Amino acid sequence: SFSSSAAIPEPTGFVLTGLGLLVFGVVRRRLCRA
C-alpha cells in the first residue's frame, strides 16, 4: 500500500479487497433479483 502500509499489511489489504469484491457481487445479485 502507499502511506498506510504500517497500519495495514499487504496480505490483509489484499484479503479485504477480495472480500469487498465478493460482498459487492452478492449485493448486486440480490438487487438484480429484486
Image (cartoon, rainbow, N blue to C red):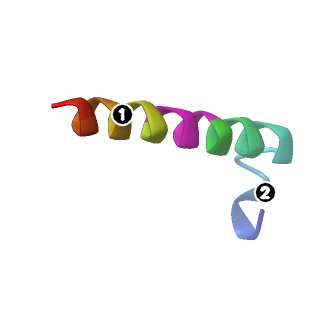
User: Foreground mark, 1 or 2?
Assistant: 1
Instruction: State which region is magenta.
Output: 19-23
Q: Residue furthest front?
A: 33
Residue type indicated by callout 1:
Arg
Q: Which residue does the image show at 75% across and 70% down from the upper left?
A: 2
Was residue 32 drawn as part of the magenta stretch in this picture?
no
2 vs 33, left or right, is right
Q: Would you identify the image quadrant in which residue 17 lies?
A: top right
CA–CA distance in space, label 1 to label 2: 33 Å
Eyeballing the image, is 28 above or below 33? below
User: What residue is pinned by disc 2?
Assistant: 5
Q: Residue furthest bottom?
A: 2
Quadrant housing the C terminus: top left
**Which is nearer the eye, 14 or 1?**
14
Q: For mark 2, does the 10 Å Cα neighbourhood hold few (<14), some (14 to 19), or many (20 or more) residues? A: few
Q: Secondary structure at mark 2?
A: helix
Eyeballing the image, is 30 above or below 20? above
Q: Position of residue 32 (x, y in %)?
A: 26, 39
Was residue 22 drawn as part of the magenta stretch in this picture?
yes
**Which is nearer the eye, 15 or 22?**
22
User: What residue is pinned by disc 1?
Assistant: 29
24 vs 20, left or right, is left
Q: Position of residue 18 (x, y in %)?
A: 66, 39
Q: Secondary structure at mark 1?
A: helix
